[in-house]
Amino acid sequence: MAKPSVAVPEVGVPAAQASCTCPGTLLAYPPPRGAGVAAAVRRKCLQVELGAGAGLLGGAGAWGVESMRASSPTHARAAAALAAGGGVDVDVDEERAASWMARHPSALGRFERIVAAAEGKRIVMFLDYDGTLSPIVDDPDAAFMSETMRMAVRSVAKHFPTAIVSGRCRDKVFEFVKLAELYYAGSHGMDIKGPAAAKASSSSRHAAKAKGVVFQPASEFLPMIEEVHERLVQTTRCIPGAKVENNRFCVSVHFRRVDEKMWGELSESVRGVLRGYPKLRLTHGRMVLEVRPSIKWDKGKALEFLLESLGFADCSSVLPVYIGDDRTDEDAFKVLRRRGQDQGVGILVSKHPKETSASYSLQGPAEVRA
């Protein structure tokens, strides 16, 4: 651990916060309020945006090559230009990086500040998977997390409710993580399940009380997603390097291995399929195009749902901490920003400056583990 001398104090809730209805102790798992909360959240948050898919697909500029380039790490282009004598201004780049770090300082460097914000509060951990717990790799099926990372996550989960929030299919990300005591929110939060059985830690104080909670706000879209997945597999078959992944409630089209000269053809192939499905929308992440149901649901909504399921809705004595590296994690960072100062900690995992609503940054999975 990078900061072995600093520990989050195990203190109770201050008297000023006694009116909060959140469950009792700082570290014990509270029971989720599954079915009732799910129904309430569905009524409050879930809306099908008819026609939204067509709007997002309108025009080649909206979801063409430029948009795909924007999803690629910009530092790769800068490095290539530098190697080719493209005249990259190193001083300007370093100045930009320094300015960005001043606005999004290292979470390790400000660890004591985060601990101070957590005093008297209940911590809930939210973790993305790809690029956060595991390195980004060319083959999405080979994105394995290290055993030391698994041990670190297991250690955190002994003390705090911990959720994995990923664009991956929930079952697939569970196969990677292999920790039954966690909450899993797959398909960008559209497939949520809590621990089926609680595991008691060595201390009875930390015995988990959580029961399983299941929430799938887009379940009616499953047949449509299956159909689109099959069509995308067929239409992208002639594009070398393209990989179509069925993440149950969304379909991911990976283009990390696709020659950039073929990106336009790939984009048009995906958009061509989706023209017949106005209830689906196209978004993008890091080197991936993603087809999702057109509902008002994302990783930020999943974070709010899990907090409410755990009994922490509208509670000032809880500190959600979210760590992620992708554009889709920005929805969660924005939720934490809206909570106000010291009411949530968003941490972006990135080696290079990019627009973010996160408060802090980390350089990669190694720093996440620390």
Image (cartoon, helix red, strand yellow):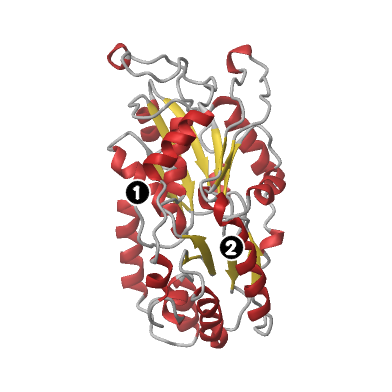
Q: Are marks 2 and 1 in contact (CB under 8 Å)?
A: no
Q: How many marks?
A: 2
Residue at the spot 45% in from the left edge and 15% down from the top edge: 24
**Vertically, is 98 above or below 299?**
below
Q: Earlier in the sequence, mark 2 or mark 1?
A: 2
Q: Amino acid at mark 2?
A: Met
Q: Which mark is residue 334?
A: 1
Residue at the spot 32% in from the left edge and 34% down from the top edge: 342
Horizontally, is 283 left or right of 92 in the view?
right
Nearer to us of marks 2 and 1 is 2
Horizontally, is 300 left or right of 160 in the view?
left
Res. 106 visible in picture: no
Q: Quadrant of the N terminus?
A: top right
Please tell me how crowded label 1 is: few (under 14), some (14-19), or many (20+) other residues with Cα within 10 Å.
some
How far apart marks 2 and 1 lie (CA) works out to 30 Å
Horizontally, is 168 left or right of 237 in the view?
left
Residue at the spot 36% in from the left edge and 56% down from the top edge: 356
Horizontally, is 347 left or right of 369 in the view?
left
Q: Secondary structure at mark 1?
A: helix
Q: Amino acid at mark 1?
A: Lys
Residue 105 x/y as whole percent: 36, 48
Res. 13 visible in picture: yes
Residue 290 x/y as whole percent: 53, 65
**Vertically, is 21 above or below 150?**
above
Between 96 and 64, the one nearer to me in the picture: 64
Q: Which mark is residue 224?
A: 2
**Vertically, is 209 above or below 353?**
above
Q: Quadrant of the C terminus?
A: top right
Q: Which mark is residue 27?
A: none
